[in-house]
């Protein structure tokens, strides 16, 4: 049986983190990266760890490092403890833990993307941004300059994913350029460049309190631009 770890980056999630952990830990071990939370998140996690013991790992950052470092540290823990599959989840109840067994069942793939085919309360502008991101990413990941559609991945920015051990090994110590939600774009590009097998799993996504803002959008646009320039060979490739 595959040894599975759910990695959850969390920052000031006192209102949701307990429910997220309790729902996820039914299906797999859980590692939460507390990214320097200033609310009661650390206290809640300590209480939960007393209850669940080794099934719940807590990584504490004293300074806020954002999503990429939070997930990378979770990946490093997974490698240290010999996990075969890592699933990444939101800490804000946007992701339904009942999908975890379906992610696990697709373990022959290197990346399973929870594709948000059904959504609840998602603003129109967020849907438009996700649609545009998918168009750009598919082109950037395609093999040729004139291949506009690539693999036709529908959701390139979803954070509800499962990564194979091979991809976890690559991403865990990768010199990431992303600094926020653009991590999901960079991770997808890393999997693609390493010839990973990718599939999408349709999920229902519930929009909740989001840290997505103009700054985060700007960072995503900058990263997409970098991918485009590399595809057109106008700037050097990433050193790895």
Image (spheres, rainbow, N blue to C red):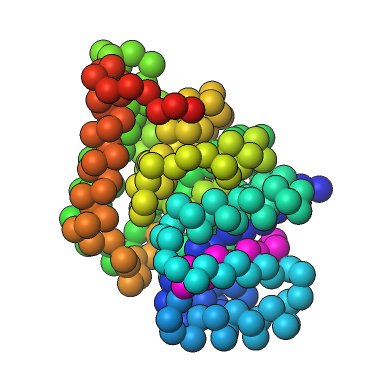
Which residue occupies 52% across, 49% down?
A: 161
| Along the viewing direction, whichever of 34 and 164 lies nearer the viewer | 34
Is residue 159 shown left or right of residue 7? Answer: left
- The mark tally for this picture is 0
| Along the viewing direction, whichever of 80 and 93 lies nearer the viewer | 80
| Along the viewing direction, whichever of 66 and 214 lies nearer the viewer | 66
Using the rendered view, name the quadrant where residue 56 is placed: bottom right
Is residue 119 shown left or right of residue 36? Answer: left
Which residue occupies 36% across, 51% down?
A: 179
Which residue occupies 59% across, 72% down?
A: 21
Q: Position of residue 229 (x, y in %)?
A: 25, 25
Q: Position of residue 172 (x, y in %)?
A: 58, 44
In the image, the segment drawn in magenta is: 25-36
Q: Position of residue 131 (x, y in %)?
A: 26, 43
Picture layout, residue 38 above or below residue 1 = below
Q: Is residue 139 visible?
A: no
Is residue 221 shown left or right of residue 72? Answer: left
In the image, residue 201 lies in the stretch drawn in magenta: no
Picture layout, residue 5 above or below residue 63 = above
Which residue occupies 28% across, 61% down?
A: 212
Q: Is residue 153 visible?
A: yes
In the image, residue 35 lies in the stretch drawn in magenta: yes
Q: Position of residue 46 (x, y in %)?
A: 64, 82
Using the rendered view, name the quadrant where residue 208 is placed: bottom left
């Amino acid at each position: 049986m595959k040894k599975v770890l759910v990695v959850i980056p969390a920052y000031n999630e006192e209102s949701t983190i307990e429910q997220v952990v309790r729902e996820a830990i039914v299906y797999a071990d859980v590692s939460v990266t507390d990214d320097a939370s200033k609310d009661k998140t650390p206290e809640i996690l300590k209480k939960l760890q007393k209850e669940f013991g080794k099934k719940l790992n807590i990584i504490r950052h004293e300074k806020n490092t954002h999503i990429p470092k939070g997930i990378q540290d979770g990946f490093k823990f997974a490698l240290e403890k010999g996990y075969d599959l890592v699933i990444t989840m939101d800490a804000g109840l946007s992701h339904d833990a009942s999908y975890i067994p379906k992610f696990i069942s697709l373990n022959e793939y290197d990346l399973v993307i929870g594709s948000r085919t059904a959504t609840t309360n998602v603003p129109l502008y967020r849907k438009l941004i996700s649609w545009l991101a998918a168009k750009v990413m598919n082109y950037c990941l395609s093999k040729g300059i004139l291949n506009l559609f690539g693999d036709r991945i529908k959701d390139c920015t979803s954070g509800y994913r499962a990564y194979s051990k091979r991809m976890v090994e690559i991403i865990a110590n990768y010199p990431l350029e992303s600094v926020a939600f653009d991590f999901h774009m960079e991770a997808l590009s890393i999997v693609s460049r390493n010839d990973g097998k990718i599939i999408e799993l349709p999920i229902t996504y519930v929009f909740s309190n989001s840290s997505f803002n103009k700054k985060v959008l700007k960072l995503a646009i900058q990263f997409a631009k970098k991918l485009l320039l590399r595809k057109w060979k106008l700037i050097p490739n990433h050193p790895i």
